[in-house]
Image (tube, grey):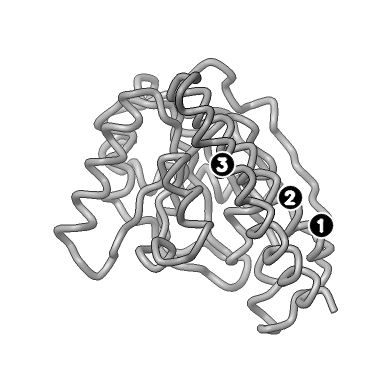
Amino acid sequence: MRSVLCILFIVFHRISSLIFMVKYTFLKKFRTKEKLTAYAYKWVQGLARGVLWCSGARMTVNGKENIPKDKTVLFVANHKSFFDIPILVSVIDMPMAFIGKMELKKTPVVSYWMKKINCIFMDRDDIRQSLKAINQGIEQIKEGQSLLIFPEGTRIIGDELGEFKKGSLKLATKTNAPIVPIYIGNAYNILETHFPWVKSTDILVNIGSPIDLENLSSEEKKNLSEYVKNQIENLRKI
């Protein structure tokens, strides 16, 4: 039943978004790029919260006060589910973009709004394109756009963390942006463990204190991916 409810909500939201698209086109004449991004992010956030409500997900969020309100940051989270992005978008109020699979670029309506909040599409099977996506992310952070990444690169079913890819953390080392570590727990039980059925699930989101690269030792910087993974592992154990 929840699967059907989620699908119906997404369909309804896509139809109603046509109104917002018209309004967005009108607002382009009068608003700054930052305000347009904020407007688009609110729409995406509405979609995320609606889908989670339909799924019956019950979220416990700890450490939301750790999110800086006046800084561009790199959010780094573990990856458990298709629902990870809706979960984090619903929790994080500051406009952020994320790096998504190239397949999402072909998704009607959703891809439109992903572009409006400056999301980056990456083809992980194409090394050159992946490098281009990382460089694009670096430039966006330098321009003041916060980003969300999943360094594991794929969904990890279960409580354990997978390997964190070193390349993705260049987004921090090349910009000196603070890293906000996030642990998402139990999200795979919404859908992945009994696909295609959506089940009501208790979700845990633990947000850690920002990691300032300037305060790290040379050894910690050298092994940044492992250091960040350990911070998220600590959040898992809370």
CB under 8 Å between discs 1 and 3: no
Toward the viewer: 225 or 127?
A: 127
The residue identified by callout 3 is 22
In the image: residue 121, left or right of residue 192: left
In the image, which disc is placed on residue 216? none
Mark 2 closeness class: few <14, some 14–19, many ≥20 residues within 10 Å: some
Marks 2 and 1, how far apart at CA: 6 Å
**Mark before the other along the chain sequence, 1 or 3:** 3
Question: Pointer 2 and pointer 1: residues touching (CB < 8 Å)?
Answer: yes
Which one is in front, 231 or 16? 16
Residue type indicated by callout 3: Val
Farthest residue in the left direction?
128
Residue 190 on image: x %, y %: 72, 70
Q: Which numbered circle lies on residue 53?
A: 1
The residue that appears at 60% across and 35% down in the rendered structure is 208
Q: Secondary structure at mark 2?
A: helix
Give the residue at mark 2.
49
The quadrant of the image that shows the N terminus is bottom right
Residue sitting at x 40%, y 51%:
99
Query: Which of the two marks, 3 or 2, is nearer to us in this view?
Result: 3
Picture coordinates of residue 209 (x, y %)?
58, 29
Amino acid type, mark 2: Arg
- For numbered disc 3, what is the local secondary structure? helix
Q: Residue at x 58, y 32 (%)?
A: 39
Question: Pointer 3: residues within 10 angstroms few (<14), some, or many (20+)?
Answer: few
Q: Secondary structure at mark 1?
A: helix
Image height check: is 148 above or below 81?
above
User: Could you tell me if the residues under marks 3 and 2 are in contact, i.e. CB atoms within 8 Å?
Assistant: no
